[in-house]
Image (spheres, rainbow, N blue to C red):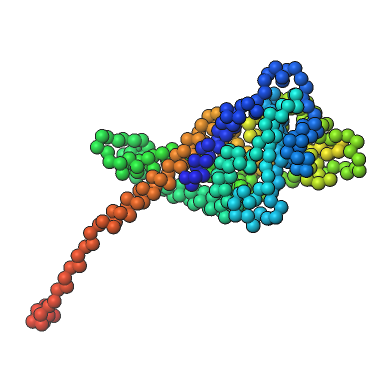
Amino acid sequence: MLIVSITGCIYVFQKELRSFFYSSYIHISDAEVKSQDIVPASKLLDIAKAQVGTNLNATFLEIGGNDKAASVRFYKPNPQLNDNQFVWYWDKVDYVYTVYINPFSGQVLKVENTKWEIFNLIVQIHTSLLMGPIGTTIISVSVLVFVILLLTGIVLWWPNNRKSYKMRTWFRWKPTTKWKRKNYDLHNILGFYVLFFALIISITGLSWSFSWVRDSIVWAGNGGKTEKMVWPTVKSNFIDKKSEKGIDKAQAELIKTYPNADEILIFMPRDSVASLIGIVRLTEDVIHSWQYFDQYTGTSLDTLLLDDMPSGERLNMLGYPIHVGSIMGLPGKITAFFTSLICASLPITGFLIWWGRRRKSERKPKTKERPKLTLIPDMKNSLAEN
């Protein structure tokens, strides 16, 4: 939990940190934005493939806001291992490259080996300790136990009277207050104040690990109903010859429909009949819609809006922005950061409390056994007569 919480603190602000440290190839000048039209998606893909190899398959194309570079992600898992055979993260992934391109001039800004990029490694540590299924299980069980500790902890914390309530909601340290008392207060008081937010972050995190958590969120969001949404199953109309570049038409329609989108992602089709899928985020991390296009002609096949989903499924889809606090903007991120920071301290302060009690019980002197009284025969007879 210490590792999960610390990496969570960093990842909450990963976009801001990336924007700061990688500004030279993530952002472009306003002059270029105003003076040129965006390069067609098919050409962006060709430019990217020329950098990493034409034999590599692109996973998705991302088009950011007006001042952001476009990026093409290339990802391939290790073909020799399935999902349960690898032990370490680097065994699972064959390659991950991200090519950053100026979407108005077509200039390549950076070819990033994302497999070893620091923020990618942080999220891999956060979710699996850079391991395979074993690491994911360790993380999942640890967070589940942490939720139980939070719930049982509030029961232990609950004060019996008004005086106890005051002592458990604010620090009343004096110059003579010992460190053990301070450690106890840090655990109890800080734990109380972040309890609600820690539960939300933990439960939304568990939704990626356990299907019963996702189903419970959907059930609660639907008001106690198990109603589930049916996702579109549209397919492209396969033709032998690509007479038109469907991805260019899909790109143009997405930009025209959502000119002020925070992010537009176009996922490449998995096979010859799959559709292009455009995901639109109007605000940070919150998906607004899923757009399905024919990969050959660019014809719009279907549209799914977040607002049209059943309330339970919508709540489940908002799990990530809730988890990182971005659903509430900067105040939400700051709240998530400090919640994660305090959560990182709870295992330490809790261990010190446990260790102190353990040592105290070891030092406690054993009570001497009292000698048994031995009655002489005459006293036995006297007691019997009485």
Side of 142 relative to 111 (left or right): left
Q: Residue at x 51, y 51 (%)?
A: 142
Residue 270 in view: yes
Say which quadrant the C terminus sits in.
bottom left
Q: Closest to the observer: 62 or 324? A: 62
Q: Is residue 374 above or below residue 284?
A: below
Q: Residue at x 65, y 28 (%)?
A: 25
Q: Residue at x 18, y 68 (%)?
A: 370
Residue 257 in view: no
Side of 29 relative to 185 (left or right): right
Residue 341 screen position, x and y as percent: 46, 38
Residue 188 screen position, x and y as percent: 38, 42
Q: Residue 190 lies in what quarter of the image?
A: top left
Residue 4 screen position, x and y as percent: 51, 44
Side of 350 relative to 77 (left or right): left
Q: Residue 304 lies in what quarter of the image?
A: top right
Q: Closest to the observer: 307 or 176? A: 176
Q: Is residue 298 above or below residue 92?
A: above
Residue 215 screen position, x and y as percent: 63, 49
Q: Residue at x 62, y 48 (%)?
A: 90
Total numbered circles? 0
